[in-house]
Image (cartoon, rainbow, N blue to C red):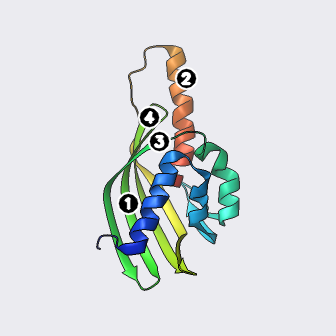
Amino acid sequence: MSALEGDLREAVQTFNDLYAKGDPRWFSHFADDATIYSNDAAEPIEGREAYQKQFEKTLTTEQRAVHVIQQDAQMMGDTAVVMQLLEISMSQLHLNARESTIWRRTAGAWKVAHLNASVIGGVRPAVNVRTAQAVRVLNEKIALVSSQAGVAQ
């Protein structure tokens, strides 16, 4: 594996930045026929449109901090396999995620053809909770983040 180079590096950086901002333009980085496996999914989501319809509302409602811990790539002409180990902080929660993507260059632009992401080590609270209501709110946030973490990072 090697580091990202050239226009692929720029595409992956923009992809990560848009995800961190909760920007709906993030979905434009997926190919129309992309296959997406979110965290612990038994079945993939087929196609950018279906994926966006299912997750746009939850992925664009807030910003998150995304730190790339490790990033490796293997390029084969107009196809690249990119692995990222990410630290993500959002909604008073922290998690680590492993994201593997297959990027294809079509019509001069890199698009995600396949994404598989999973949470590593579980979701952790950013602060200690001290009341029953805070525990309920935290549990709701963990459930929401768990459903979307495999998406993103």
- The residue that label 3 is drawn on is 64
**Percent of width and height locating residue 145:** 53, 41
The residue type indicated by label 2 comes to Arg
Q: Are marks 1 and 3 in contact (CB under 8 Å)?
A: no
The residue type indicated by label 3 comes to Arg
Sequence-wise, which precedes: disc 2 or disc 4?
A: 4
Is the residue marked by circle 3 packed among few (<14), some (14-19), or many (20+) residues within 10 Å?
some
**Residue 13 shows in this picture:** yes
- The residue that label 1 is drawn on is 84
Up/down of 20 relative to 7, above or below: above
Q: Residue at horizontal 51%, vertical 53%?
A: 18
Q: Are marks 4 and 1 in contact (CB under 8 Å)?
A: no
Up/down of 116 relative to 59, above or below: below
- The residue that label 2 is drawn on is 136
Which dot, 1 or 3, sits closer to the camera? Answer: 3
Q: Residue furthest bottom?
A: 77
Q: Residue at horizontal 66%, vertical 45%?
A: 57
Query: Separation of disc 3 and disc 2 at Cα?
Result: 21 Å
Is the residue marked by circle 1 packed among few (<14), some (14-19), or many (20+) residues within 10 Å?
many
The residue type indicated by label 1 comes to Gln
Is the residue marked by circle 4 packed among few (<14), some (14-19), or many (20+) residues within 10 Å?
some
Sequence-wise, which precedes: disc 1 or disc 3?
A: 3
Q: Secondary structure at mark 3?
A: loop
Sequence-wise, which precedes: disc 4 or disc 1?
A: 1
- The residue that label 4 is drawn on is 93
**Percent of width and height locating residue 72:** 32, 67
Query: Separation of disc 1 and disc 3 at Cα?
Result: 16 Å
**Residue 150 shows in this picture:** no
**Percent of width and height locating residue 117:** 47, 57
